[in-house]
Amino acid sequence: MNSYLSEREMQIALECCKGKTSKTIAEELGISKRTVDSHKSNIYRKLGITNNVELINKLYNLK
């Protein structure tokens, strides 16, 4: 999976799996919410998913 996602995308994906909102992730990483949303959009596109539940399933099924 790491070959598909950038280091930052993987970081954001893992934070999403912890149930954190885009706003919270943005504040913790010192970036804008819009940047987090852009990363999430790229993550969903790259993994062929449409929501956070699918993201969680995808990440945990690959471990």
Image (spheres, helix red, strand yellow):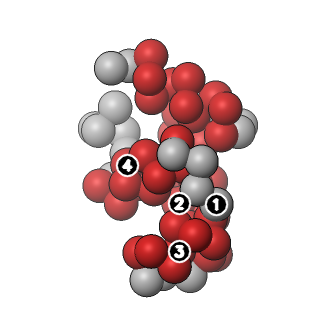
Provide residue 58's location: percent of width, then percent of height: 51, 25
Q: Residues within 10 Å of mark 2 (few under 14, many from 20)?
A: many
- Amino acid residing under circle 4: Met
The residue that label 1 is drawn on is 21
Provide residue 57's location: percent of width, then percent of height: 56, 23
Query: Does residue 16 lie above or below 54 as drawn?
Result: below
Q: Residue furthest right?
A: 50
Disc on res. 39: 2
**In the rendered view of the protein, which quadrant contains the N terminus?**
top left
The residue that label 3 is drawn on is 26
2 or 1: tag closer to the N-terminus: 1
Asked which secondary structure carries label 4, the reply is: helix
Of residues 17 and 62, the one drawn nearer to the viewer in this rendering: 17
Q: Residue at x 44, y 23 (%)?
A: 60
- Amino acid residing under circle 3: Ala
Q: Residues within 10 Å of mark 4 (few under 14, many from 20)?
A: some
Badge 3 vs badge 1, beta-carbon distance below 8 Å? no
Distance from label 4 to label 3 (Cα)?
14 Å
The residue that label 4 is drawn on is 10
Distance from label 2 to label 1 (Cα)?
13 Å
- Amino acid residing under circle 1: Thr
Distance from label 1 to label 4 (Cα)?
15 Å
Of residues 49 and 53, the one drawn nearer to the viewer in this rendering: 53
